[in-house]
Amino acid sequence: MSSESISDEIRARVESLRAQINYHNYRYYVLDAPEISDATYDRLFQELRRLEEEYPALITPDSPTQRVGADLTTTFAPITHRTPMLSLDNAFGAEELREWDQKIKRYLGMEPHSPIEYVAELKIDGLSISLTYEKGRLVTAATRGNGITGEDVTPNIRTIRAIPLALVAYAPQNAEPAVASSPSQPSLFEETAPIVSSPPSPAAGIPELIEVRGEIFLSHEEFARINAAAEQAGAPTFANPRNAAAGSVRQKDPRVTAGRNLDAFFYAVGACEGRSFESQQELLHTYRAWGLKTNPHMRVCPDIEAVLEFTQIWDTGRDSLHYDIDGVVVKVNSMAMQRELGFVSRSPRWAIAFKYPPRQAQTVVEDIVVQVGMTGALTPVAILRPIRLGGVMVSRATLHNQDEIDRKDVRIGDTVVVQRAGEVIPEIVEVILSARTGQETPFQMPSVCPACGAEVVRAEGEAVIRCPNRACPEKSRQRLLRFVSRNAMDIESLGEERIDQLLEAGLVRDAADLYSLTKEQLLPLERMGEKLAGNILAAIEQSKTRPLNRLIFALGIRHVGEHMAETLANHFGTLERLSQATAEELGSVYEVGRATAESVASFFADNDNRHMVERLIAAGVSPQAAEFAPQSDRFAGKTFVFTGTLTQLTREEAEARVKRLGGRASGSVSKSTSYLVAGENAGSKLTKAQQLGVPVLTEEQFLQMCEEET
Ligand code: IVH
């Protein structure tokens, strides 16, 4: 069909779908504040796909359907940056930062005491990227390379959904800065209102050409997922999220990159034609309004002391981030001042990187032990001489598998560098070979399971070895521990020690046995009394009605973590339906991959497992609806934000209530917030809500609203 014969109506629909999809992408990826459900989004996407299939003449390169190309890249062609990508000078510690402040004041001919306004930003530990947009369309994406010339990685970068293929003006240019960072409580959700409430109109103020600079990174969660998958496949794992991000950007097949869920923040500009910025603050704000994701945790600081306060907050605050940072970047806010300051060799005078000491330390590997997991995977764990790392004591580090031990050549007795990043389990970075005495003992993974003596197996292509024994006592023990754990059935009075007691006394073998325990059986156990036995039985009884997603998680099915359990619970609705699903049906559920589908299907195909589940149900385990599955639409379309200390509910409970009533819980107040529920000691969110005219409820009023008849 020639493009002329396509009706205006269809053209308009395609345009409208693209605008809507881009807008909802923006809400989801950039603002972290989606307005529509995934299912509605998928419907828009499918409709656009269908129309484009029918009328290929309408396909444009920046259509949201065109992110993942199928062509393989054989070389990454060089791209010369229009403006070089500079590096930053470092400052280690408060004194060096104050010296830098003094130095630039002297350069500018200012008095030592007159303040300079700075912007403090987190220094994202990823890899830098330069995107070129011409007339608002993404044309190339290049790595930093040597700063002058980088590599063309456009097909891969296009797969990142946080990166717009076209810039659009989503918000008025004079809108207030969309940034804030709470001093006492750095949180991912402190950012101020997205200033958007309706899909965009075509942009004004977008430059003819702009090189947008920022950082590509991987979240801790994605990093763990990618490494787990690599391990499963017997492929080498990545040492840290940054290496994994760099490896993902340099993939020859963009489909592989697309599967890595890379993310990005933008913070600087290279060449720019047809538009200028007065300040770094304005730049960040404008980027966000164009659909470019900026980091919410920045602060405009009146002087260097305020910058130092920011660096202190994030020294500990960084543990709560879901990505790595390695410092704070401090920039002179005024662009006029920046121009005056200029550059020295390859770094700007107007910016500096304040570096945190890495969370690494040296210690000694006292032993290597082998842990048997729930699914039988044998994991070597280094027992370390305890050391303090980033505020916590560390005495163990995972060694993943034999390949990893061999690659790093870790031996018992070695002095090693250990590192901890955020919530991630500590790991051994390297062995200090110069500290070897010759007394160190190499380690070999056992050929039999340390718990049951069964000969271990290594599936083809996997790096992990497993105990194949269905009756392995350690596997049963780990499964039980999962079952009772806090995020599973949450049987509080049954900790590790109690479970061991029950196993030793032969009172339980699997989770279903818990539900037939009696007081008479418990009383003879050591350190057990009437009251405790009563508490244990009551806790077990209470667990019978845990939500379905928790029960699914509790079963300890390989590849089914908490999030997957929620997905499965919401989709299948009952344990029975889930247990009858074929691998194909499972695989067709959004987010369920092949390995997971097969693992779930084979779990329920197994006679022992089926029998155990039947016994659970016979014992009266009857899960409630999935935790967050909406049960009513009372709060449909309403967004709640909670702040301050609640007295009758925890924050999680309050948010769960909102979700169950069909509403959304968000972490930040914006114009689209329906209600702010303010507990005691409410802070900046309350002020913000009052400024925006968002209705504020007390906890009491919120509870009443939940209970009201509709
Ligand atoms: S500004 C001319 N801001 O740090 C200055 N850089 O050591 C351009 N980085 O190559 C950089 N977060 O990859 C800037 N908020 C941030 C940053 C940041 C991370 C990286 C960037 C740069 C390196 C310099």
Image (spheres, rainbow, N blue to C red):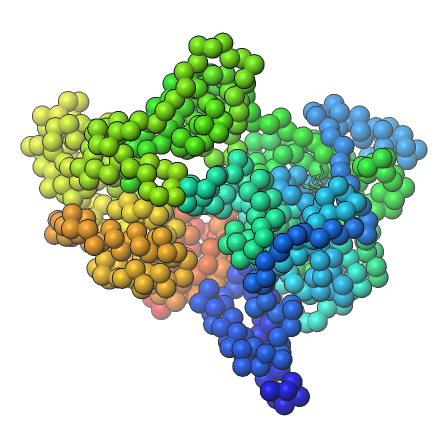
User: Does 445 sit left or right of 73 as displayed?
Assistant: left
Whether residue 368 can be seen here? yes
Residue 679 drawn at (x, y percent): 47, 46
Task: Tell me which residue sits at (46%, 22%) in the image.
Answer: 410
| Marker count (numbered) | 0
**In the figure, 202 relative to 315: above or below?**
below
**In the figure, 442 relative to 646: above or below?**
above
Task: Tell me which residue sits at (18%, 27%) in the image.
Answer: 501
Residue 131 drawn at (x, y percent): 71, 55
Which corner quadrant of the image does residue 659 belong to? bottom left
Q: Nearer the viewer, residue 364 or 15?
A: 364
Where does ligand 1 appear, by image quarter? top right
In the picture as drawn, the residue positioned furthest to the right comes out as 109
**In the figure, 71 relative to 111: above or below?**
below
Residue 12 drawn at (x, y percent): 62, 82
In the picture as drawn, the residue positioned furthest to the left comes out as 520
Residue 283 drawn at (x, y percent): 75, 52
Which corner quadrant of the image does residue 457 belong to? top left
**In the figure, 7 relative to 420: above or below?**
below
User: Does 70 sit left or right of 449 as displayed?
Assistant: right
